[in-house]
Image: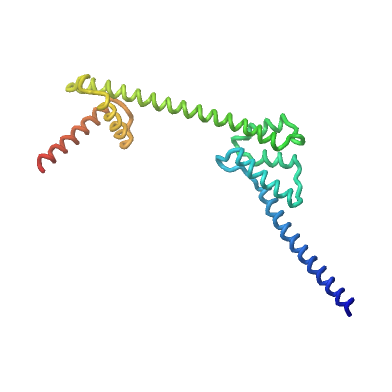
Amino acid sequence: MIIISSLITVTAMWDALETLREGTNDVKQSKINTLVQQYELFRIEDSESISSMQMRFTHIVNKLQKLGKDISNQDCTNNILTCMTREWQSKVIAIKESQNLNALSMITLFGKLKEHEHEINRFKSSDEDSKKKERKSISLNTTSSVSTSLVQNDDECDDASINKEEMRLFVRRYNHYIKRNGLKHNDKNIVNFRKASRKGKESDSDEKLVS
């Protein structure tokens, strides 16, 4: 009786362990399926840096390897190049044509992508500086043009009556005026703006007198 009881107990324990193992395998396979889907659908996000993309991609690959799902180096490099956006296509083509993807490691590939990213950012920074200089030049030209037009079109004013601070204030108001009314900068619009400004001042003076 003792022997039979012992056999029943061992069998029950074995069955329980087998059931637990199968359940653990199901959970493991479910995790693998989820990670494989993330791997296959992996894409670089808008405005994402290469360093950030590298961290996300490496995290998925490492988790798959820990679960026993090995991915070849060639498959990884191909997937990385495939996930890049259109602005990266020239670099992607250059890498494919000049490199042996079978021997190209992920670290080397990400290094090349970071070099290209640095060049892109440098060009963008240069373009922004050029645009800032252009806007500053336009602003200075507008100020000079407005100043000249004021003297030419107003018999009542002279150079001494227009100081720098007044000119800056006038230019700001004038720029707001032409933008608000969808106009272009020219002498006629400057004259019209001055007339409108004077009428506004006269209306304010009349209101003060009435009050």
Residue found at the very far front of the displayed protein:
2
User: Residue 37, percent across and down?
Assistant: 68, 51
Q: Position of residue 198 (x, y in %)?
A: 19, 32
On screen, 123 above or below 23? above
- Residue at 22% of width from left, 19% of height from top? 159
Q: Residue furthest bottom?
A: 1
Q: Quadrant of residue 48?
A: top right
Horizontal side, residue 34 vs residue 131: left or right: right
Residue at the location (58% across, 29% down)?
Answer: 119
Q: Image quarter for residue 88?
A: top right
Left or right of 133 on screen, residue 189: left
Which quarter of the rendering shows the N terminus? bottom right
- At 76% from the left edge and 65% from the top edge, which residue is drawn? 20
Query: Could you tell me residue 74's position as x and y percent?
Result: 75, 39
Residue 64 to residue 200: above or below: below
| As drawn, 149 above or below 12 | above
Q: Quadrant of the C terminus?
A: top left
Q: How many marks?
A: 0
Q: Is residue 116 left or right of residue 207?
A: right
Question: In the image shown, does 209 or 31 lie closer to the viewer?
Answer: 31
Q: Position of residue 207 (x, y in %)?
A: 13, 41
Q: Give the colouring mode of the picture.
A: rainbow
Q: Residue at x 46, y 26 (%)?
A: 130
Q: Quadrant of residue 201?
A: top left
